[in-house]
Image (cartoon, rainbow, N blue to C red):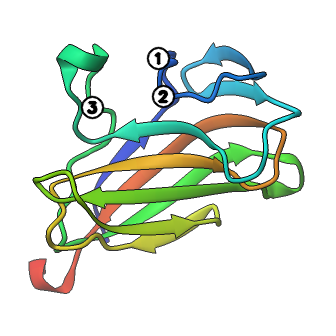
Amino acid sequence: MVVENYKIYWNEYSADTYLYGSEINYIDKNNVEFTNMLMPPGTVIKEWYSMVNYQAKRIEPTLPIIDGESIYRVNVDIDTPRDRGYIIRFVFFDKYEMEVGNCTISKSKAEFKCPLKTYSYKMQLINGGMHEFTFHSIEIEELESESKK
């Protein structure tokens, strides 16, 4: 059972976007076309954060706060040729900004659980071999855990 859900969109802030040779067309908040024919696989295309230094980046966090007690479902809405070619990676940090774990997803739907020490995290969209795609949204749903029933 879904407790809460959050939709993450591609904002026009470009400091956390791979721009070298990229052509990005912002049609709507849930419709962003990306093309880069020379980008190598494994490149981080876009990052979203649950906690940011506003004075340094001048943006607000775009990810919901999550905890290590719940299970989360990710629904990725990205149109790619042959429905493949992207990787979603979550990197979890403790309160000292040290990495305490990560989770990699290459399907359009998957479930994950973050480490108990998680204080903040970031989500990365990584090139898995695609050269063009249309990004709509990524949804993170908090599922009801057995302990909360």
Q: Position of residue 80 (x, y in %)?
A: 80, 46
Q: Secondary structure at mark 1?
A: loop
Q: Is residue 43 left or right of residue 35?
A: left
The disc label shown at residue 30, or none:
none
- Which residue lies at the image location 19% right of the left edge and 86% below the top edge? 146
19 vs 135, nearest the viewer: 19
- Which residue lies at the image location 28% right of the left edge and 13% below the top edge? 58
Q: Is residue 82 above or below residue 69?
A: above
Dots 1 and 2: beta carbons under 8 Å? yes
The disc label shown at residue 16, or none:
2
- Cα–Cα gap, marks 1 and 2: 7 Å
Q: What type is the residue that disc 1 sits on?
A: Tyr
Q: Residues within 10 Å of mark 3 (few under 14, many from 20)?
A: some
Q: What type is the residue that disc 3 sits on?
A: Pro
Q: Position of residue 105 (x, y in %)?
A: 56, 66
Q: Secondary structure at mark 2?
A: loop
Q: In the picture, which quadrant includes the N terminus? A: bottom left
The disc label shown at residue 13, or none:
1
Of the numbered discs 3 and 1, the one sitting upstream in the chain is 1
| The quarter of the displayed image where residue 25 is located | top right
- Which residue lies at the image location 82% right of the left edge and 47% below the top edge? 130
- Cα–Cα gap, marks 2 and 3: 12 Å
Q: Is residue 134 above or below residue 25?
A: below
Dots 3 and 1: beta carbons under 8 Å? no
- Cα–Cα gap, marks 3 and 1: 12 Å
Q: What type is the residue that disc 2 sits on?
A: Asp
Residue at numbered disc 3: 61
Q: Position of residue 141 (x, y in %)?
A: 36, 58
